[in-house]
Amino acid sequence: MAGADRIEVTAASGGSPLAAEPVGAFAADDLAVVKVSGGSLRPASWGESRRAEVGQIVLAMGNPLGLAGSVTNGIVSALHRTVSTRGEGAFQGSTIADAIQTSAAINPGNSGGALVTLDGQVIGVPTAAASDPSIGAPAAGIGFATPSDTVKRIVPQLIRSGKVSDSGRAALGVTVRTILDPQSGQRSAVAVVEVQRGGGAAKAGIEPGDLILSVNGTATPDQTALSSVLATLKPGGIADVEIQKPDGTKKRVQVTLSELPGGG
């Protein structure tokens, strides 16, 4: 959606494209809202993802590979997964907490569709398919969806103001970038670029130029790993953060977590 002023939406049943305008997006949960003009569309019925059960039959609806109105079936394979998606272009990627894992086929074009129960309740928004690192191809039967409970918390905020003021997600209060080891070229840590004034990191003594090595004992060799750890935590909690100062000194600090802000 970045940079888009007007887009077109085609209903699953086909027909002429409908005019639509971007309303807002929240990249952390890979969610966006568009306002559709014209046509006679019926709103979906949203269910409660907290009531989903492993083994429950679900349908994934979307436009995989450009095939509009496609439906694949499967089951809920697992619950409460933490899943990170790769960045693409201006999109830096997202980390979904409490994701629903499903065996329903998820292919490019399903993203943004619906994961639906047999009684027509939407319990998730398909987001990503797992990939096999040995061959770099999608892993069959392993897909993930953003839970509907998250959607129902985030989307109304986007509709009201185009941004998210209550994300429910933890943050350290820093801006970071991934550091590559100069010898191996491998990702080794995240470097602090900016520290939010008055935030938890600042109060704990974290400064620009510091490296964040781990959070609560989990190594953070890159931004994705850091986001994955923070996605399991809550604002107001305390995180044990291992940092390395520019002089090579390592230390552990206690950081009171703030809330991840949402952009427009």
Image (cartoon, rainbow, N blue to C red):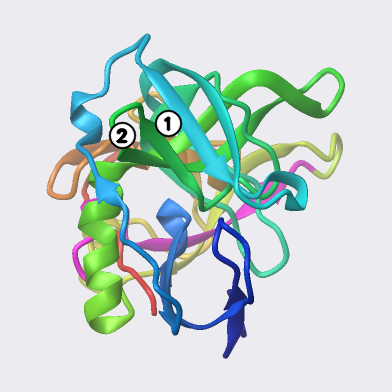
Residue closer to the observer: 66 or 191: 66
Tell me if 184 is positioned left or right of 122 in this view. Answer: right
Q: Is residue 243 visible?
A: no
Q: Which residues are the magenta region?
A: 164-181
Residue drawn 76% across and 47% down? 65
Residue 208 shows in this picture? yes
The percent coordinates of residue 156 (x first, y second) are 22, 67
Question: Picture quarter containing residue 148?
Answer: top left
Q: Element under label 1? A: strand
Choose between 264 and 44: the one closer to the eye: 44
Which picture quadrant has residue 107?
top right
Q: CA distance from mark 2 to mark 1?
A: 8 Å
Closer-to-camera residue (235/86): 86
Residue positioned 39% across, 80% down in the render: 264
Q: Is residue 62 above or below residue 80?
A: below
Please give the residue where the numbered disc 1 appears in the rendered image. 82
At x 25%, y 83%, the residue is 161
Residue topped by disc 2? 232
Q: Tell me whether the residue at label 2 lies in contact with that at label 1, contact meaning CB atoms closer than 8 angstroms.
A: yes
Classify the position of the N terminus by image quarter. Answer: bottom right
Instruction: Classify 10 Å Cα crowding around label 1: few (below 14), some (14-19), many (20 and above).
Output: some
**At x 83% / y 17%, what residue is drawn?**
134
- Horizontal side of residue 62 vs 65, given as left or right: left
Crowding at label 2, few (<14), some or many (≥20) Cα neighbours within 10 Å?
Answer: some
Position of residue 21 relative to residue 31, above or below, is: below
Residue 194 sits inside the magenta stretch: no
**SS at circle 2:** loop
> N-terminal of the two: label 2 or label 1?
1
Q: Is residue 84 left or right of residue 117?
A: right
Taking the view exactly as shown, the residue that stands out farthest to the top is 55
124 vs 102: above or below: below
